[in-house]
Image (tube, rainbow, N blue to C red):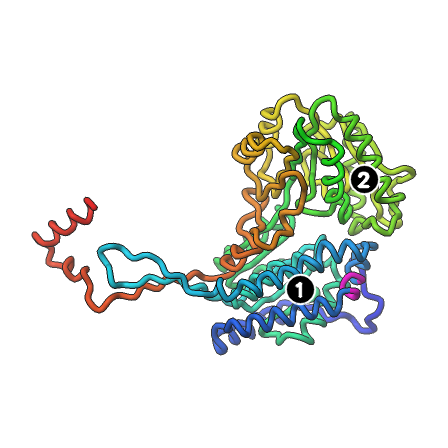
């Protein structure tokens, strides 16, 4: 964890007592002030958007310090743009989403009315990971604000510079009883709070712990986890075009992305073509790993883990193919080179653990059924990618696999679509945020039944007799 050199005093950290006080303040504010209007929600979203726009450079700089190095442009594209665009998208649609929905009424209760109204859940807790610390904070937050909730946010310990900056910006722009970032909050203490909903983005292992702790309060959880996202290049698709696209998201953030292509299936006989294409493509994008466009690994332990995963694979017979010249891993800058691995087997850690770095194992196949059998033998991933223009094959792969999301002919872009939900399945998570589904997930959809002046049900009151029997027979027949 990095420490901010610019603060003369110790940064303010949130302890258990503070956490409980903030939660109580937010719960009290919700009780006293009631459900926020459309106008109030739009105002909060506007302040959030303005705050992000006004402090883009400071935010990108803080994130870069937390990583050791990350290009401003990566933060602009993968975080700032998606957050600001996401707020615009929700602002345009929120009025429609908030409208009560009329629902049909049973034939036997004609004259009555059914309505479903989305109401806030109350206080929502958000636990943010370090890899996209702005986007994975703001994206669920947008849905929570839109639904009228108050929010407490815990940033990752690896994001100390950003966490302090965002805590300060939020404190300047929002009352604590509405939105609050709690720098230094303990993860287990935070998740033990009796929130009305808890959103966690991170690893499956921590996700299980969060769910266990939340269960004591019967707090419902949204878990956005990870997994090994498989990528398939079909025989009909251009190897060069597939390589250009998948290597962008594999090298973005140095592969530290939960939906990055984790391992690759290439048709038998096309591996050499892929390797040659990959080398040409990446040497055109980065002169070497010290390029300012190439991101550092987040910390020493993550860097060492990648080294050991790679070394173990090579010791067990895999072949390591570096994609950039003169690019040995550099512990000082924590820059780790993009590497292809061939000859991988299931007993290697690289094929068992989510890689979360710029290593890409390649396997070959003769028939797509071999690929599907392999994928279906693993935990359900957060994403699955297929490069093919064959509609029949696309349908087959989609229908015969399970994953959080699917990308056809590109990778990772499904997460940035504002009108689509983002979420996992099985070990890759539960629930979703983003889009109208994110709004609904952060709302209590409250059914309201309004009885008519006269009710046909009165004909069915006890004592039961002939009339009841005649009517119930008719009801069961229709």
Instruction: Tell me which label, 2 or 1, sits earlier in the chain.
Output: 1
Numbered label attached to residue 338: 2
In this rendering, would 337 be left or right of 267? right
Judge by depth and name the residue closer to the eye, 212 or 66. 66
User: Is 60 within the magenta?
Assistant: yes
Callout 1: SS: loop
Disc 1: CA contacts within 10 A as few (<14), some (14-19) or many (>=20): many
Is residue 156 shown to the viewer in this render?
no
Numbered label attached to residue 255: none
For this orientation, the residue located farthest to the bottom is 32
Magenta stretch: dominant secondary structure: helix
Residue displayed at 80% across by 43% down: 304
Look at the image and tell me in which quarter the N terminus lies.
bottom right
User: Is 166 within the magenta?
Assistant: no
| x then y, percent, for residue 187 | 64, 59
Name the residue carrying label 1.
Answer: 185
For this orientation, the residue located farthest to the left is 466
Is residue 297 shown to the viewer in this render?
yes
Judge by depth and name the residue closer to the eye, 351 or 448. 448
In this rendering, would 446 be left or right of 314? left
Q: Is residue 223 above or below residue 351?
A: below
Q: CA distance from mark 2 to mark 1?
A: 35 Å
């Amino acid at each position: 964890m990095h420490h901010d050199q610019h603060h003369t005093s110790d940064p303010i950290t949130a302890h258990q007592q503070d956490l409980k006080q903030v939660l109580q303040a937010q719960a009290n504010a919700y009780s006293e002030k009631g459900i926020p209007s459309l106008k109030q929600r739009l105002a909060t979203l506007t302040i959030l958007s303005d705050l992000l726009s006004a402090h883009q450079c400071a935010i990108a700089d803080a994130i870069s310090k937390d990583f050791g190095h990350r290009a401003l442009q990566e933060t602009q594209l993968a975080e700032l743009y998606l957050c600001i665009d996401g707020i615009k998208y929700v602002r345009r649609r929120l009025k429609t989403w908030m409208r009560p929905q009329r629902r049909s009424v049973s034939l036997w209760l004609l004259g009555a009315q059914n309505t479903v109204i989305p109401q806030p859940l109350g206080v929502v807790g958000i636990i943010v990971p370090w890899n996209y610390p702005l986007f994975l904070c703001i994206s669920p937050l947008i849905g929570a604000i839109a639904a009228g909730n108050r929010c407490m946010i815990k940033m990752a310990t690896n994001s100390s510079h950003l966490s302090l900056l965002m805590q300060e910006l939020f404190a300047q722009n929002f009352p604590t009883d509405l939105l609050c970032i709690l720098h230094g909050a303990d993860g287990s203490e935070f998740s033990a709070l009796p929130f009305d909903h808890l959103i966690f983005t991170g690893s499956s292992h921590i996700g299980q712990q969060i769910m266990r702790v939340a269960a004591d309060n019967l707090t419902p959880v949204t878990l956005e986890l990870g997994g090994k996202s498989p990528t398939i290049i079909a025989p009909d698709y251009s190897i060069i075009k597939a390589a250009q696209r998948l290597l962008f998201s594999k090298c973005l953030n140095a592969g530290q992305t939960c939906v990055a292509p984790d391992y690759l299936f290439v048709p038998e006989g096309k591996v050499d073509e892929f390797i040659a294409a990959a080398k040409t493509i990446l040497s055109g994008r980065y002169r070497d790993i010290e390029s300012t466009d190439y991101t550092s690994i987040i910390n020493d332990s993550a860097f060492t883990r990648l080294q050991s995963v790679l070394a173990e694979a090579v010791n067990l017979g895999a072949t390591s193919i570096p994609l950039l010249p003169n690019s040995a891993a550099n512990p000082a800058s924590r820059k780790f080179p993009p590497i292809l691995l061939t000859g991988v087997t299931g007993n290697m850690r690289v094929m068992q653990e989510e890689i979360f770095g710029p290593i890409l194992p390649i396997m070959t196949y003769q028939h797509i059924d071999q690929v599907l059998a392999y994928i279906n033998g693993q935990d359900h991933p957060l994403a699955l990618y297929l490069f093919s223009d064959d509609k029949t094959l696309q349908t087959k792969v989609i229908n015969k696999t399970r994953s959080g999301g699917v990308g056809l002919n590109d990778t990772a872009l499904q997460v940035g679509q504002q009108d689509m939900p983002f979420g996992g399945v099985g070990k890759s998570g539960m629930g979703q945020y983003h889009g109208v589904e994110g709004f609904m997930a952060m709302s209590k959809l409250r059914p309201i039944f309004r009885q008519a002046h006269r009710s046909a049900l009165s004909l069915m009151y006890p004592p039961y007799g002939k009339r009841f029997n005649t009517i119930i027979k008719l009801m069961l027949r229709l």
